[in-house]
Image (cartoon, grey):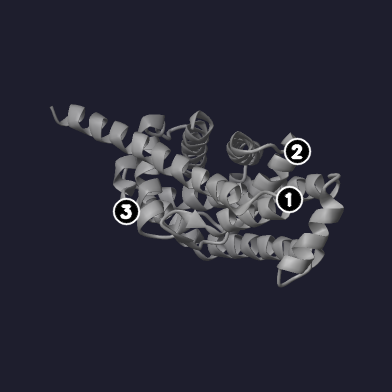
Amino acid sequence: AVLFLASQVFYGWRWRQAYWVIIRHRQPSGGAEKPPTLKTFLGIIFLGSLVSLSILPSFLGQDATKLALYRRLGGEFGAVLGSIILTRITGLIGILIVGFFGIVFLTNSPVWPGLKIRLSQSSLLPAYESQAIFAVAGLILLLIGLSLAYALRKKIQVTYRDMVPLFEFRLFISALASQVLFAVSVAAAIMAVGPIDVFDAFAVSSISLLIRIIPLSIFGVTLGEGVLASLLMALGWNIEASLMSAGLITAFLYLCAGIGFLAELFNQSKALK
């Protein structure tokens, strides 16, 4: 639970960095004001997490909440929109890198030969074809994100040439670190349920993270949890332990969102006094 909470805090820090890049770009002379505190960003992040877990699927609810509450960050809609796009594109690249290493770890694991046979028998597609589809899906989503950034460049108030410097290297590094932290959190949850090699656990968590980029979920349960449970069953786990691992991840996400939301309510009540 601590790792999951840390990953959410780190995500809030990433979003604040992206927002700072946007407003600093608008006023390159150094006149840009410092962005609001990390606590302000985290309050919106945790509220958005609850929306994603209960109303809108996957990351869509969180991004919608960010836009709805953009005035809390200074009222610059274009800057908030730009920071969301920057955060998502850099995060997607981080997910693709982590997912790639997860596939490498799994295909080089001693359990891979037997796992490949079981996946081929239980899946609609052979395992190697599924990997190709995951990779193509990730690249398509990346292109969609870049196209969206280009289409909304007037809202962000930057030109096409100005968009390139916005993708600072530190944003990619922090995005990669954030995805690794989340994958490690999921791997730790898997290892808490049953015996599994640490590299296999990381591989399963990384591949499930890769699938989570598809914005489909029901009350916080995404396609990633379904793939995670399927991979664990293919590794020889029984259905109860596999579903428990997937359910534990969703429970941790609800717990973290709830803790953060209560903290935000407490802060707001103090501010009203």
CB atoms at circles 2 and 3 under 8 Å apart? Answer: no
Q: Quadrant of the C terminus?
A: top left
- Distance (Cα) linking label 2 and label 1: 13 Å
Q: Toward the viewer: 204 or 158?
A: 204
Mark in the foreground, 1 or 3:
1
Q: Position of residue 216 (x, y in %)?
A: 50, 63
Q: Who comes first in sequence, dot 2 or dot 3? A: 3
Query: Of the residues shown, which amino acid type is indicated by label 3?
Result: Ala
Query: Of the residues shown, which amino acid type is indicated by label 1?
Result: Leu
Where 47 falls versus 1 (above or below)? below
Where 199 falls versus 234 (above or below)? above
Q: Position of residue 205 (x, y in %)?
A: 65, 45
- Taking 147 as reference, is 255 left or right? left
Query: Of the residues shown, which amino acid type is indicated by label 2?
Result: Phe
Please give the name of the residue rendered at 51% of the width and 36% of the height, measured from the top-left corner: 4
Q: Toward the viewer: 271 or 228?
A: 228
Mark in the foreground, 2 or 1:
1
Where residue 199 is drawn, which disc sits there?
2
The residue to which callout 3 is attached is 68
